Amino acid sequence: MHVNLLLVECHRMVVFTDTAATSNTHRPEPSPSSYAQTTFSGLCEAVLGRPGKIVGAVNLLLMQVFACAAFFTFVGRNLTAAMHSWGFEIVDFRTVVILFGILASGSTLLTDIGFLKTTFIFGNIAVLISLITIMTYAIPSFSFENLPVETTLPQLTVFFSMSVYTFNGIGEVLPISSSMEDTAKYPKVLACSIGMLYLVYLVFALAVSGSFGGKTQGMVFDNLEGPVVAFVKIFHSLAVLCTIPLKYFSGIKDGLVPLLDMMLGPRECVGTSVDQVNCSLNATIRLGTRLATVVVSVATALLVPDFAFLVALIGGFCVTIVAFILPPLMFFVLSLDPRHKFSALRQLLNGLILALGVCICVVLTTKNLKDKFFT
């Protein structure tokens, strides 16, 4: 929660600095350019310059592309298992992943997230049904004796990496907080949302661990059996597919597009015939790179069909950089401005978060890769 509020505070300081520097009044109003920093990569550019924008945009893009790869793996494995349980042996993992990759490619062209409102509702209902079904299976076999689960170091590494992955929504913090009518209420809304979310996580984790103990799989569906479970696997897979367009939308808008704008220039087709040709080439490249994000996700899912590893890798590397390194680093840079005064304790706290983020990134990423490919 602290890093989310830290990001909002950094944005507020950027807006203050921008408006104070361009206004001659005692109460400056935010200039239009101030609102350009309501994206994560935009804020990184405003504070850390071009290198900051590149690092922020690249990690946001990688985070969402590989998250989609993990989702394709999840969907492929669960749909294949469900079909096999019903006697459809012809269905295989690769076919399912490629098919849904083709279907998902259209979502990379979306420009209005409101178009996905209906799919979001369906996805949330499907997830709720799936969680209730899993709890129904887990609770009857619950035992406190199963809770002291014995783990190995590689398992702990994956656990902490997947825990860090829960911060993957950091890229949506600024758009959400900036769109609120009363931004002062954002901390309370955030606290309530995170509190409810972690309560659900805690109850679910205790129920599953107390039921399956050390046999708990990276995808808990692998611990379940029966025709109803196969149906839930299909339902939950479709729900996951409903979230893939949002992942691509976020990664492309706040990651890929800023990078392409830096490399290719403006997108408007105006000027001479030569400009028109260049702009057509520009548009073709932009379309190709959008579709390429799906190709990378599908290829990753086929080459590394390990849901737990992919989520752990994203958490240990991309999410750590975006959530625990860049926000405190931006805060430190902004706090150097004499107009922003903070206590030594506040500076120390953010310094510790930054140091912790660097350590987490190096240790978890190295350990995840080593345990997966070199042991």
Image (cartoon, rainbow, N blue to C red):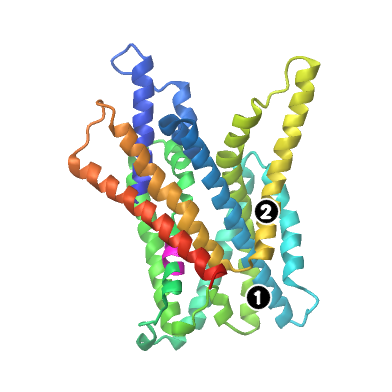
| Residue 59, above or below 276 | below
Q: Is 183 a magenta residue?
A: no
Question: In the depicted view, which residue is nearer to us: 125 or 47?
Answer: 47
Residue 46 visible in the current orientation? yes
Residue at the left extreme of this rendering:
344
Q: Are marks 1 and 2 in contact (CB under 8 Å)?
A: no
Expressed as whole percent of the image width and height from the top left, the position of residue 153 reads 41, 74
- Residue that label 1 marks: 231
Q: Quadrant of residue 82?
A: bottom right
Check disc 2 and report its element: helix, strand or loop: helix
Side (left or right) of 62 relative to 83: left
Foreground label between 1 and 2: 2
Residue sitting farthest toward the front? 374
Give the distance between the C-alpha atoms of the residues marked 1 and 2, in whole angstroms.
29 Å
Q: Residue at x 73, y 22 (%)?
A: 269
Give the dominant element type of the magenta stretch: helix, strand or loop. helix
**Magenta residue check for 159:** yes
> Where is residue 329 shown, x and y percent of the image?
36, 41
Q: Which of the pair 316/7 is nearer the observer?
A: 316
User: What's the magenta region?
Assistant: 158-163
- The residue at the point 61 percent across, 40 percent down is 256
Q: Is residue 275 above or below residue 360?
A: above
Among numbered discs 1 and 2, the one appearing first in the sequence: 1
| Residue 27, image x, y percentages | 30, 18
Q: Residues within 10 Å of mark 2 (few under 14, many from 20)?
A: some
Residue type pointed to by label 1: Phe
Residue name at image x 24 percent, y 26 percent: 338
**Mark carried by residue 46:** none
* Pointer 2 residue: 296
User: How many numbered marks appear?
Assistant: 2
Q: Is residue 237 visible?
A: no
- Label 1 Cα crowd, 10 Å radius (few <14 / some 14-19 / many 20+): some
